[in-house]
Amino acid sequence: MQAFKNRLSQYAVINDDNWELIDNISTKTVTYRAGEDIVRVGEIAETLFIVNKGWAVRHRTLEDGRRQIVNFMLPGDIFDLQALACLEADHTVTSVTDVSILVIDTREFVQLLRTSGDISSSFWWAAVQEESILREQIVRLGRRSAKERIGHLLLELQRRMNGAMGTNHKQLPLPLTRVDLADALGLTPVHVSRTMSAMRHSGLIEESRGVILIDDRERLARICHFNTDYLHLRRLDFSKFSMPNGSSHITPHTNGKANGSSRPTRA
Amino acid sequence: MQAFKNRLSQYAVINDDNWELIDNISTKTVTYRAGEDIVRVGEIAETLFIVNKGWAVRHRTLEDGRRQIVNFMLPGDIFDLQALACLEADHTVTSVTDVSILVIDTREFVQLLRTSGDISSSFWWAAVQEESILREQIVRLGRRSAKERIGHLLLELQRRMNGAMGTNHKQLPLPLTRVDLADALGLTPVHVSRTMSAMRHSGLIEESRGVILIDDRERLARICHFNTDYLHLRRLDFSKFSMPNGSSHITPHTNGKANGSSRPTRA
DNA sequence: CGTACCGTTGATTACTGTCAACCCAGGTGG
DNA sequence: CCACCTGGGTTGACAGTAATCAACGGTACG
């Protein structure tokens, strides 16, 4: 849960009662070895998942073998919120590294959402951010060159990893093969390899033993038109969700105006 | 609201009390001429929107002018659910045709979600479907040829329009230029034109005065690897959201087991 | 020490982009 | 009623990015 809390605490003001509620969510930890399927197409999920450690991908394979990675799931990411609607999974989720996953029962989770507006908001924010990342992936695939796609993705993953870990490193441990990158970026592994080596030669990135180093983030960001707006990294205003004064019985653990002070700030 | 109700009623069992709640949502109707911006990048939305009539697109333009359409908004589609998190819009929404839009106040909407589990579920389902459509767009852009992208998008739009209108036509009125299609599909207008004319010659589609006719849907679907699973067109099971027996005070208009019968069916 | 997996590089092909001309329908105005 | 204009759409010639096919090299591991 730590990674999710890291992520959240940077962007939202959560009071102690609510941190306690989050801590008390009853979870089961499950681990998978690298390359195992966590969710399969067509399954109806009964649970939500939060990545605790390791990387996973959501992907789809067409009948003729073409594979597209839809998004990467990093520590702190929640997935299958769609389980709440009890729908069939339309993609497979597979671990990339060894992973540990927190499993949350859907019914219990829905109850939790009812008890606290702040918690609803937290998860809602996470869902909005995820969707936003999907939209950016669409722009990446539709309108960027190979070099831009690679640089842009690396910057995104770096930002997200730092958010999950509560760090701000220039290094990015990247447990992905050229095939993975190609399948995420709509390219072939050969072309990814070629393009990355060109980027290495022009000093945009360095790479050694699975770790990417981006020395001049500004420069890479300029070249790739990377802009963090879509990650919604600003402080949140949760007042929309706070309970009206007349109905505090819905929220036993918080009072209606607890977050009145959390106006949006231009971090 | 009719289009949304059409869409919803095909996939969910909603009881009369809840239909009434939906009908009583207080909305304001706003109309825009073709080509006007409805939501601009960077704005913080205070409202939700439901498309009532006409088409709109969500899109983003890079600094150098490259433009990507992220998704199409058809009648019955809800947008800016992210307004609930009070976040800045990361894309612009623009009308394609003249449109009429229902505007719903966020606060009031959040209240409504609290009063009925069925209503929460309906909107949740819509949100999940939307996200699913985004994921399919990613696969389309990443791993499909020009011909497949075009055919696949046309089939999706046809299915969605029929869902919104409650019809099952072979015709699809398509108010999009080649430029729009190109910007949605990550191609150039010239190539879209060429590819569509090839598709016309091979009898995959017909086109006259802005209306596409897909005579042999099966054939086109086979060629484009189109599969409707991602649209989640099956009956929903809302029991996850139904209130537990002990807390019916939260849901004055419905009792806890009203939807016990809506098991998922293999339509 | 050989196998397996991954990354790299070269040669060639092909799909899609670019630039530019032309066409056509619809609306406007003389 | 017809010349004119405008915004799509189409077509051709050519260019360029990325895909394909294939060989080779390095590192990990049994």
Image (tube, coloured by chain):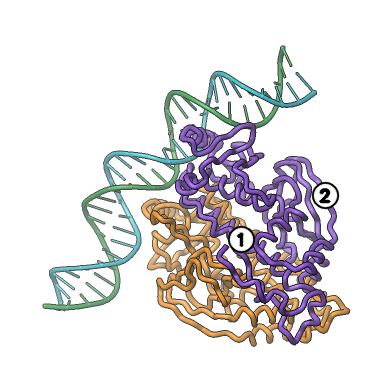
Chain colours: A purple, B orange, C green, D cyan
Q: Earlier in the sequence, mark 2 or mark 1?
A: 2
Q: Is residue B262 visible in this depiction of the protein?
A: no
The residue under the point 72% across, 41% down is A97
SS type, badge 1: helix
Residue A233 in percent (x, y) is at 60, 60
SS type, badge 2: strand
Tell me: residue B71, above or below residue A239: above
The residue under the point 47% across, 47% down is A224
Same subunit under labels 2 and 1? Answer: yes
Residue A216 in percent (x, y) is at 51, 42
Quarter that holds the C terminus of chain A: bottom right
Q: What's the chain of the residue with tag 1?
A: A
Q: Which residue is mark 1?
A: A131
Left or right relative to B48: residue A222: left
Real-space Cα separation, disc 2 to disc 1, in angstroms: 25 Å
> Which amino acid, mark 2?
Val
Residue A74 in percent (x, y) is at 68, 50
> Which amino acid, mark 1?
Glu
Q: Which residue is mark 2?
A: A30
Which quarter of the figure has residue A247?
bottom right
Left or right relative to A4: residue B248: right
